[in-house]
Image (cartoon, rainbow, N blue to C red):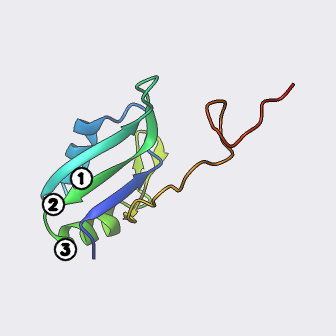
Amino acid sequence: MATKLYVGGLAYAINDDKLNDLFSEVGKVTSAQVIVDLSTNQSKGFGFVEFETAEDAEKAIKELNGKEIEGRSIMVNAARPKEERSGNFGGNRFSNNRRPRY
């Protein structure tokens, strides 16, 4: 079992510290991060929590998955590895593989 968990359905008011506090009640948290939009600095409604042990991570899933936090039911499960993005998805105006439209 991985020690890094995905946490979805977070209220926008939840920040890193609140996420850490919430999961610290279950076990020893090594990191807690809410993912934010880079341009607006607003939460995207999900984050990641990493535990010191796999046992604590499993306990967090069992105790916190589906729990209502600040009016929203959160989803907690094992985080999957980040998928690699390949190349250009359709290009943009700076792409060399696209003809200009006239």
Q: Which residue is mark 2?
A: 27
Residue closest to the eye, 38 or 22: 38
Identify the residue shown where x is 24% and y is 53%: 23
- Location of the C terminus by quadrant is top right
Q: Position of residue 75 (x, y in %)?
A: 44, 57
**Mark 1 and mark 2: Cα distance apart in space:** 7 Å
How crowded pointer 2 is (Cα within 10 Å; few <14, some 14-19, many 20+) is rated as some
Q: Are marks 2 and 3 in contact (CB under 8 Å)?
A: yes
How crowded pointer 3 is (Cα within 10 Å; few <14, some 14-19, many 20+) is rated as few
Q: Which mark is residue 23?
A: 1
Q: Position of residue 98 (x, y in %)?
A: 73, 39
On screen, residue 17 above or below 74? above
Residue closest to the eye, 49 or 86: 86
- Location of the N terminus by quadrant is bottom left
On screen, residue 101 above or below 81? above
Specify whether 5 is left or right of 42: left
How crowded pointer 1 is (Cα within 10 Å; few <14, some 14-19, many 20+) is rated as many
Identify the residue shown where x is 20% and y is 72%: 54
Q: Position of residue 97 (x, y in %)?
A: 68, 43
Q: Are marks 1 and 2 in contact (CB under 8 Å)?
A: yes
**Mark 1 and mark 3: Cα distance apart in space:** 13 Å
Q: Which residue is mark 3?
A: 55
Identify the residue shown where x is 31% and y is 34%: 15
Specify whether 11 is left or right of 23: right
> What is the secondary structure assignment of the residue under circle 2?
loop
Q: Are marks 1 and 3 in contact (CB under 8 Å)?
A: no
**Mark 2 and mark 3: Cα distance apart in space:** 9 Å
The residue under label 1 is which amino acid type? Phe
**Earlier-in-chain disc, 2 versus 3:** 2
The residue under label 3 is which amino acid type? Glu
**Earlier-in-chain disc, 1 versus 3:** 1
